Image (spheres, rainbow, N blue to C red):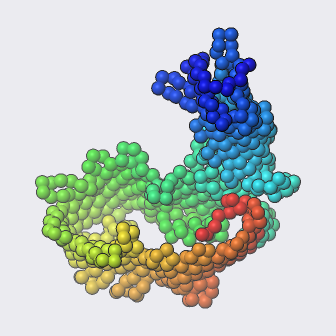
Amino acid sequence: MASQTGKILFPLQNNTMLKFKPLFLFLFFISLSHGLYCQVIECTADNVYSEFSDTGDILKTTFEGNVTITYRDIVITCEKAVIDHTKNLITIESQLKFSQKGFSLSANQLLYDIDKETGKFIDSRFSYKPFFGSSKVVEKDKDKIFADTCILTTCDRENPHYHLLCGRIQLTEEKISIKNLKLYFGNIPVFYIPAFSYNLITKKPIFMVSAGYKTEIGNGISIIFNNTSKSKKIDMEERIDIGTEGLGAGLVLQDSTLPDTTSAIKKFQAYGFKKYGNYKAAYGFTGEFQQEFDYGQNVILDWRWMKNEEFFRKHLYDQYLEKSKNPNYFSYSKILGQGLVNVRVDEWAQENFLSPSRIPEIEFSMPYINIGNLFGSFNIVPTRFVDNKGDEYSRIVADIGIEKPFSKFSTKITPFIRIRNVFYTGQIEEINNFIFTPGINFQWLAMSDKKDGNVIYFSPSFAVFTNFPTKKVVPFSQDYYDSNPDSTFASLNLSWDFWHRQTKTGNITMMNLYDTGKNLFSDSVILWNFSSGKKWFFQGQERFNFSKGGIREQLNTITFKRNTLQVGFGNRYLSGYFDGVTAFFNKRKGDWEFGGAIDYDMQSDKFTSQRYYIQKNFHCLTIGIVYSKTSTTSIGLFIVPSAFAGSRF
């Protein structure tokens, strides 16, 4: 054994170099060189000792006093460490601290393999925000952490308010996987799960426990766990409801890897409920899927099936409001050269039985065809119909369009011709409807650039076209292919985009269609949104008809946000269903947060939807009360780890 106190350079085994420099602390470098590959381990200590072989090669180096070992993004501190140069192992048999990126650990022993980048820690405590844990044995791989018989929590106290007792955990940057999980509040066991995985990117609450009253379930308790799949792509929400009226269970699957900027959707939701007594179980599901694939393929799916409409309305109320008036829909499309093939299925999802109206519809189209100086399009759409009586029909649509655009300055003029043939056959007399449609479209673009940095883009368009059908009336009205009235139409679309110093601050879009023959407007639409600084936000949509009844639909909201307060107010109108106001507020003050949202129908003079909540952070846990009332009433107390409680701010 020799003590190194000067500047010495020795050749080592495995193309490794050992270098010392006389500093305030001895500085030690190990360079692992394999061709062009080189890694450096930097060590500092008060004292450094080396053990040599008979041939003068260094076998071991011992560091003592204020030892710091740095390797890539790993930092280890301790009082004594030994490096075995023949095996490239670091051994520490005293208290140590280990850190790498957001992961930190303290232990009593460590054996670390430099080549394999693996380590074994004994009697460890670790943290990986928001988690704290302890384990007898922790093993580290290149990008994974393993721990056996581990206690895990987000509470930083010596005796945590709650903890998870885990048989084994696996921790990566993206997720944590647990086997044999037991949930404890204090020392009281609450729940057991054989296996569980959690997404560390989305950071939804690991669990949520609520107790209270709900009309369908009665007095009861609900437990929700947020899980993730082995592939780390699918988040899973698992729900169990135990009440005085019955038992319920639900599952939600959603792709967590999709960014907010994409149009892709992957979501599945299912729920079942069994009322006590001689009642059959009720259940249902909804699914949404939309994604582009290689080779120009695209799939869209929006489908549901419910045991009955009452179950849909009571147990999946949010989905009921969103989907109950819409059909099930499936579409597959593929680009073939300049053409497009599309297969569609519509099913009018009456919740108590399957009642298809169109299975399937197949479309082949060529949206862009160059014909000399002209632009053309072509599509053919064969469709099979089944009505509620079970009668079958077929329809074949052939559609050809030709246009010739002319551009001059900021104006674009496009004359066009469309030829459509619609053929019906089946359990009716055959019908052939030929429609010839000439027209012209005008488009403009104007810009107003002001000295204060405000820029306004104005882009209006105006079109006139006439339908000449051979059949003015057909006994079908499934979609726009069947609507070919004998008339002349005019459309006017207006759009304003508002910018301030390269930031978009608002938009107004108006769409109108007028039937000159019948002197009737179709429904017109206005969409608008504005922001004023970072505090005020305005958005709305209006649908109205100048010829029939005026306003059909309105949804307008003004929102004010400032620090720990946000307030919103607006009106909502749906002809024949709802005419009223909507409002919400959220306020945070210290550890408290509270708020609510209401919809009030002035026609029926009642609240159609109410939701109020108040919650408080108690160190590592957030406890709150939620009251909601729609067609049903529920009130409950919930408990969730504060690290995952979320906020409306």
Query: Does residue 446 sit above or below 622 in this rendering?
Result: below
- Residue lying at 60% horizontally and 69% vertically, measured from the top left: 649
Residue 563 lies, in percent from the top left, at 59, 74
- Residue lying at 59% horizontally and 19% vertically, measured from the top left: 10
- Residue lying at 64% horizontally and 76% vertically, measured from the top left: 587
Query: Does residue 23 sit above or below 392 in this rendering?
Result: above
Residue 249 lies, in percent from the top left, at 70, 58
Horizontally, residue 210 falls left or right of residue 57, namely right
**Residue at the top extreme of this rendering:** 54
Query: Does residue 489 sit above or below 257 in this rendering?
Result: below
Query: Count of labels shown?
Result: 0
**Residue at the right extreme of this rendering:** 187
**Residue at the left extreme of this rendering:** 372
Residue 166 lies, in percent from the top left, at 77, 44
Q: Considering depth in this image, is 177 or 154 the residue closer to the camera?
A: 154
Q: Considering depth in this image, is 576 or 393 the residue closer to the camera?
A: 576
Horizontally, residue 463 falls left or right of residue 355, namely left
- Residue lying at 82% horizontally and 53% vertically, measured from the top left: 158
Horizontally, residue 623 falls left or right of residue 600, namely right
Q: Is residue 67 among the parts visible in the rendering? A: yes
Q: Considering depth in this image, is 136 or 575 the residue closer to the camera?
A: 136
Residue 443 lies, in percent from the top left, at 22, 71
Q: Is residue 171 among the parts visible in the rendering? A: no
Of the 4 image quadrants, the one containing the N terminus is top right
Q: Considering depth in this image, is 420 or 189 the residue closer to the camera?
A: 189
